[in-house]
Amino acid sequence: MTRMETLSIQRSAARFLRYAILIVYAVTTIAPFVWIFLTSLKGATEVYVNSFGLPRAWKFINFSTAWSKARVSVYFGNSLLYSFGSLFMCLLFAGMVSYVLTRVWRNLALFSYFMIGIMVPIQALLIPTFMLMKNIGLLNTRIGLMAIYVAANLSLSIFIISGFMRGVPIELEDAAFVDGCSRARFFFTIMVPLSKGGFATAAVLTFLNCWNDFVFAYIFISPMNLKTISQGVMILKGEYITDFGLLSSGLVISIIPVFIMYILFQEQVVTGLTAGAIKG
């Protein structure tokens, strides 16, 4: 056997091993979602006797029951409001702060101050945050919970967006100012579109953090009509007996926005993560 043939066999074996590992990883990643979806179409008793098989009777009524009778629609709407409201405010504030730190006032100490939020877990500040929200009257309010979400995600968003804004040529800003462009107009019409990869990456991460949150909503929200989808799914779990078909239906409903968000911004997120690794 020649050396070229040996190298060809080695490359083929390496390629086969690589694809085999990727296939196993893909199957193990997708399998839990498939199992949850199949479980959501089963009856309460069938889950115990036929846990991993196909449903004997496809009970799509579980979704309508969870949506209406279990009030998942209310919790779903609350989470959408909290997530998108917090997302809008977080991106607006993070974008403006990043522009100031990278273009107007390049202050390392100020930038480090904002980055402290990444190193300090927000859960460690639950007690003082609870007391603050109670004293200013924002406990058990929508605005209060969204303010906490913005504060919790602001530092990471600034870190991501500022890395992209540093890559925008300074000559472009000088030319815009010579033509009479104001800072506000330059920010919204030029800087934001050129940094869309960073905004998309920060948007997806912020949305996921807000949508999947349980701790903040559990501590700072008590009224049932203000609870989030994560709390709503927990309510579907009974104290003594649980309808796992109904519970799985609630889980499937809660996963849908996450898939939609990632599908819409998949290309921007991948571009943002790779480009952000070499900028700044």
Image (spheres, rainbow, N blue to C red):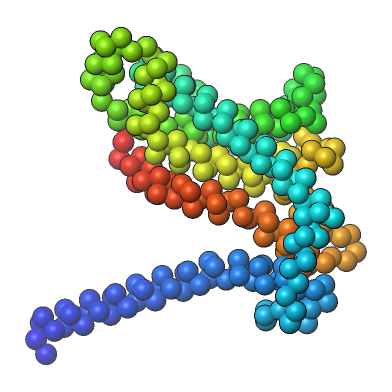
In the rendered image of this protein, does residue 262 appear above or below residue 101? below
Find residue 205 and report its horizontal and vertical position in percent: 52, 43
Q: Residue at x 47, y 21 (%)?
A: 97
| 150 relative position to 160: left or right | right
Q: Residue at x 54, y 68 (%)?
A: 30
Find residue 166 and report its horizontal and vertical position in percent: 33, 27
Q: Residue at x 38, y 24 (%)?
A: 189
Q: Residue furthest bottom?
A: 1
Q: Quadrant of residue 165?
A: top left
Quadrant (top left, top right, bottom left, bottom right) of the N terminus: bottom left
| 96 relative position to 213: left or right | left
* Camera-nearest residue between 265 and 114: 265
Quadrant (top left, top right, bottom left, bottom right) of the C terminus: top left
Q: Is residue 48 visible?
A: no
Q: How many marks?
A: 0
Q: Is residue 217 visible?
A: yes
In the rendered image of this protein, does residue 228 appear above or below residue 245? above
Q: Quadrant of residue 19?
A: bottom left
* Camera-nearest residue between 162 and 196: 196
Q: Residue at x 47, y 69 (%)?
A: 25
Find residue 277 and report its horizontal and vertical position in percent: 34, 42
Find residue 82 and report its horizontal and vertical position in percent: 67, 36
